[in-house]
Image: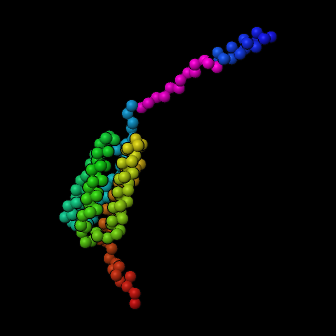
Amino acid sequence: MRKMKVFFIVLLSLWACKEKPKEVVEEKTEIDFFDYRKMPKKHQVTSKVDSLLVSWKEFQMFTSSLGVLYKATTAEDLALAVDDVLEKEAELYKSEYPEAFDKSQVKSRQRVLRTYLLKVKADIANKMDATPAVVEMLQANNELHQQFDIVLGNVLNSELILEDE
């Protein structure tokens, strides 16, 4: 009986020490985290707005940098373009706005755009799918352009509305 117990203990210990198969973890060598085909189309501003924006040098530089995003096809291209756009956005924020666009509505849309730019940069740094953030950022840019149209198209005199009698 005692020999049988020893035999089972040895058998169990051999079974417990048996080398377990290692889990096979496949690593992607190339991470695909940007799909350039899902980008929204650019919003076209009215000719009245365009005539004011043409003379705004910092905005023109920002727009040309943003145009590179539409041409980016790889994550590396996108990362370089986002860094450049962030620099141009900082210069734009410090620049002198045309009188018609020197309003909190325009500046707040620009800050939202910067937030989404930073979100794209974070997604790239964390090697996450940056496509949704890029789409949101480009939509924020379109909303900034729409705000230009709204500001110039607004015919209400805000001073009359806010005036107390």
Quarter residue 129 falls in: top left
Q: Is residue 130 above or below residue 2?
A: below
Residue 114 in percent (x, y) is at 35, 57
Q: Could you tell me residue 33's position as x and y percent? A: 39, 41
Any part of residue 140 in sight: no
Does 12 appear above or below 45? above
Q: In the image, what residue occupies the spot 60% across and 17% down?
A: 18
Whole-percent x, y for residue 127 in the image:
40, 41
Q: Is residue 24 left or right of residue 18?
A: left
Whether residue 139 is in magenta: the answer is: no
Picture quadrant where residue 94 is located:
bottom left
Q: Nearer the viewer, residue 74 or 39?
A: 74
- Total labels drawn: 0
In the image, 89 versus 47, the foreground residue is 89
Say if the magenta span includes residue 20.
yes
Res. 21 image quadrant: top right
User: Which residue range is magenta in the image?
Assistant: 16-28
- Image quadrant containing the C terminus: bottom left
- Identified at 25% across, 52% down, the residue is 65
- From what the image shows, is residue 158 above or below residue 82? below
Q: Position of residue 121 (x, y in %)?
A: 36, 48
- Between 99 and 90, the one nearer to me in the picture: 90
Point out the image quarter for the N terminus.
top right
What's the residue at 35%, 61% (across, down)? 111
Question: Main SS type for the magenta part?
Answer: loop
Left or right relative to 8: residue 103? left
Q: How is the structure coloured here?
A: rainbow
Q: Is residue 52 left or right of residue 115?
A: left
